[in-house]
Image (tube, rainbow, N blue to C red):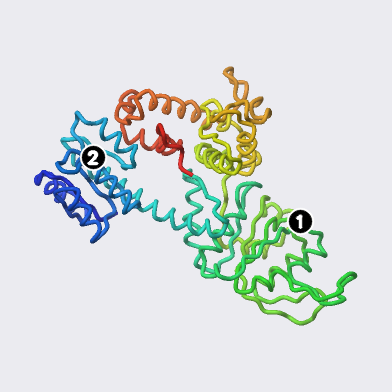
Amino acid sequence: MPGRILIVDDDPLVPRTLKLLLQKHGHEVRTAPGVAEGLAQLQARPADVVVSDINMPAADGFEMLKGVKHGWPGTQVVLVTGYGTIESAVRGMREGAFDYVTKPVLDEEMVLVVDRALESARLRTENAELRAALDRATGGKKVIGADGAFLKVFDTIEAVAPTRATVLITGESGTGKSMIARLIHEASPRKAAPFVEMNCGALPEGLLESELFGHTKGAFTGASGARVGRFLAADRGTMFLDEIGASTPALQLKLLRVLQERRFEPVGSEDSLEVDVRLLLATNEDLGKAVADGRFRQDLYYRISVVPIHLPPLRERVSDVPLLAQHFLKRFSEENSKKVAEIDDGTMTILQAHGWPGNIRELENVIERGVILARGDVLMPGDLPPELTRSAPAPTGSRTLPLKRALEIPEREIIERTLRAHNWNRQRTAVALDINRTTLFNKMRKYGLLDRRPGRPLPA
C-alpha cells in the first residue's frame, strides 16, 4: 500500500539511501535534516509515516516523536537507533512510537516496518471513522475488538451502510446486535432521519401489530383514538426489528408486503400508507430451521437475509476479553469514583477461561460488580462472582475447554510474563521465546498486549 513517508536524519547518506529504497516500493518520500525542518514539512504536507533517527544534534528523535504526536496524532513514527541505544528506542515506543529499527538498517526490515506502520495508520483512520459514527449512535459507548472474525463485521458494515439493502443480524443474546444496527443507521445517508427500534418478542400479537403499523379509532376494544405506528414514525429513516423470529404468521405477511411494496394498512383501516423505510432485523435463533419447521415464511426469510451479519459469541473471541474487560474497568471506575486501574493476571485468566453464555452483556455486568466490590486498585479473583471462580479451570484440568482456547490461555500468560521480565523489550523477549519479532508482534496483537506496558493501561 503506497504511502507518504518523511525521513528525518542529519546524516545525508541515510535519507538518500532509504528514499531510493522506499520509492522502489511505490511510496512518496521526503527527507529532512533535522527536527525543525521535519516538523515544518509536516506542517506544509502531512505524512502517513515518519522515520526518524534518535541521535541528532539540536533536537533528537524524541523531540520529533513528541512533535508528531502533538500535531499529527494519526501519523505513525518509526525510530532508528544504533545497536547500543536499544533502550532509548524502547523508551520511544512507550512514548508512542510505532516501532524501531537498529543500525545498520536492513532493507527488508525497513520495508516491512514501514508497510506495517502504513497499515496501522490506515486501520486507525478507518476505526476512528467507525468509532465516531458509533459514538454518535450510542452516546459514546465503544466497540472494542481485534478478533479477525469480529473485524470482518466492520468490513460488511462499511459496504452495506450506504445502501438501502435489508440486513439480518444474527447472534446470541448479548453480542451487540442492537448496537450494530444503530451503527449501520448512523453510517448511512439516513442518519439524520429517525432510528426506530422494536422488540418483536416484547408484546403480544395484537398489540405488536398495532404498535408497528398503527390503528384507527375504534379498531379494537380500548382503541379510543387513532395511533401512528412505528413504521410511519420511521419514514425516511431506519426500522430495526429485534427478535424477528418471534413474529407471528400474520405479522410476517405484513412485513413481506412492506418490503415488496413499501405500503401497509393500519389496523382497522382499508387505506394504504406508503413509507420509505430501511429495514434492519435481528434474531438469536436459527431462522433456517424455523423455515424448515414451518414457523417462519420462506419468502420473507429470503427477503430479509439479503445481507447477513453474524456476530460471534464472546467465547469465540477470547483474545478480545482483555480489551473488553479493561474498557469496562475504566468506564465503571469512573462512573463509581473508584480507582481500580488494573486487572490481576489471575483474574484475567479466569475471565478468559469462562464460557460467557451471556456474552458481552454478561462480561459488562461482571466487571461492574467487581469494580463496586473491589477494595484496592487491582481487580482480584475474589472480586468476581462466585460462579466464575468456582468454574475456573483447575490445575488438574478438571474443566474441559476447547483445545484452541485452552492453549491460548497459557500462551498469553507466558508471553506477558516474558515481556515483563525483559521490561517489555520485544527484541529480547523474542530471543528468550525463540521466535522472531514479527511472530511476537502478531501474538501481542492477538492477545491485546501491544499497549499493555508499565504505566499504560489497555486502550479503551
Q: Residues within 10 Å of mark 1 (few under 14, many from 20)?
A: few
State the residue at coordinates (54%, 63%): 186
Horizontal side of residue 437 vs 324, given as left or right:
left
- Residue 298 x/y as whole percent: 68, 62
The image position of residue 458, as x and y in percent, is: 46, 39
In space, the residues marked 1 and 2 are separated at their CA atoms by: 57 Å
Amino acid type at image mark 1: Ala
Residue located at (33% from left, 25% from top) = 434
Q: Residues within 10 Å of mark 2 (few under 14, many from 20)?
A: few
Q: Amino acid at mark 2?
A: Glu
Relative to 211, residue 61 above or below? above
Out of 315 and 45, give the one closest to the viewer. 45
Residue 92 got which mark? Answer: none
Looking at the image, residue 428 sits to the left or right of residue 298; the answer is left
Extreme-top residue of the structure: 396
* SS of the residue under disc 2: helix
Instruction: Give the side of residue 152 with respect to residue 121, left or right.
Output: right
Q: Quadrant of residue 30?
A: bottom left
Using the rendered view, name the quadrant where residue 456 is placed: top left
Name the residue tied to disc 2: 109
Residue that carries the numbered disc 1 in the rendered image: 202
Residue 443 percent location from the top left of the image: 40, 35
Q: Secondary structure beneath disc 1? A: loop
Marked residue nearer the N-terminal end (1 or 2)? 2
Instruction: Please tell me which residue is depicted at 32% across the width and 29% down the height of the picture.
Output: 425
